[in-house]
């Protein structure tokens, strides 16, 4: 067995220590400087950037043929792209449509939104599960179950709806998915 599997000298060790330390400090400064949005609950765009940053950082720390300058430029580039896309998303609604997956109603006023459940590979049992996790024993008293942009499911009880203004765009978009969302409530059993 070749000794190079275990030891290739001090040069790669020093390289890893230097690039790892400087790269880590660069990431901390960049992420601190771009504000809490970069580290907020992740949308798909944020997830892609986080995975890419992690992958790039892991690669530059362990690759001895990557210079310190190249490692810093790669990390700065990725954070700059995320910051630029977040800025464009905040300024132009058209970019939000391109970059964000909008929230989706899965259950509204007693009706399961069948097309939305099917499209997002969810079942009525998933809705019942999140309702239980939110402290409800049944769908009675639950007004809305929504699939958020980050993939989590949220439950809104009837007493918490208020005027429903944060849901109106999604109600209008979902009309026709499984009947009108304003029909009389129907509560389905978990096995339906």
Image (cartoon, helix red, strand yellow):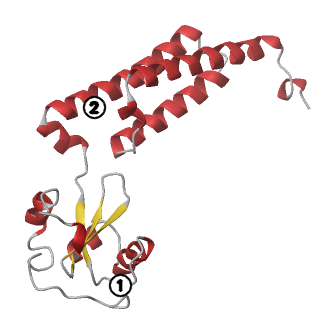
Q: Quadrant of the N terminus?
A: top right
Query: Under tag 2, what secondary structure?
Result: helix
Residue 59 in view here: yes
Residue visible at 53% across and 28% down in the picture: 56
Please tell me which residue lies in front, 113 or 40. 40
- Mark 1: give few (<14), some (14-19) or many (20+) Cα within 10 Å: some
Residue position for label 1: 138
142 vs 83, nearest the viewer: 142
Instruction: Name the quadrant containing residue 42.
Output: top left
The residue lying at 58 percent from left, 10 percent from top is 68
Q: CA distance from mark 2 to mark 1?
A: 39 Å
| Local secondary structure at mark 1 | loop
Q: In the rendered view, would you say 98 is above or below 87?
A: below
Is the residue 19 above or below the residue 186 in the image?
above
Frontmost residue, 87 versus 132: 132
Residue position for label 2: 86
Q: Which badge, 2 or 1, is on the more N-terminal residue?
A: 2
Q: Is residue 160 left or right of residue 173?
A: right
x%, y% of residue 108? 20, 74
The quadrant in which residue 33 appears is top left
Q: Is residue 106 visible?
A: no
Location of residue 91 in the rendering, given as x and y in whole percent from the top left corner: 15, 30
How dense is the environment of label 2, judged by Cα within 10 Å: few (below 14), some, or many (20 and up)? some
Give the percent coordinates (x, y) of residue 102. 22, 53
Q: Do tag 2 and tag 1 residues touch (Cβ < 8 Å)?
A: no
């Amino acid at each position: 067995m070749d000794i190079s599997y275990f030891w290739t000298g001090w040069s790669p060790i020093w390289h890893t220590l230097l690039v790892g330390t400087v790269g880590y400090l660069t990431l901390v400064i960049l992420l601190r400087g771009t504000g809490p949005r970069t580290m907020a609950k992740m949308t798909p765009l944020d997830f892609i950037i986080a995975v890419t940053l992690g992958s790039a950082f892991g690669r530059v720390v362990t690759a001895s043929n990557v210079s310190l300058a190249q490692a810093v430029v790669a990390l700065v580039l990725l954070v700059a792209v995320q910051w630029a896309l977040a800025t464009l998303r905040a300024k132009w609604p058209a970019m939000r449509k391109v970059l964000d997956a909008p929230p989706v109603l899965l259950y509204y006023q007693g009706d399961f939104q069948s097309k939305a459940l099917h499209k997002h590979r969810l079942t009525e049992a998933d809705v019942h599960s999140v309702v239980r996790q939110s402290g409800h024993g049944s769908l009675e008293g639950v007004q809305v179950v929504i699939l958020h942009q980050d993939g989590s499911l949220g439950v809104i009880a009837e007493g918490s709806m208020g005027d429903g203004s944060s849901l109106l765009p999604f109600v209008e978009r979902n009309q026709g998915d499984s009947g009108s969302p304003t029909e009389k409530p129907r509560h389905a059993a978990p096995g339906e």
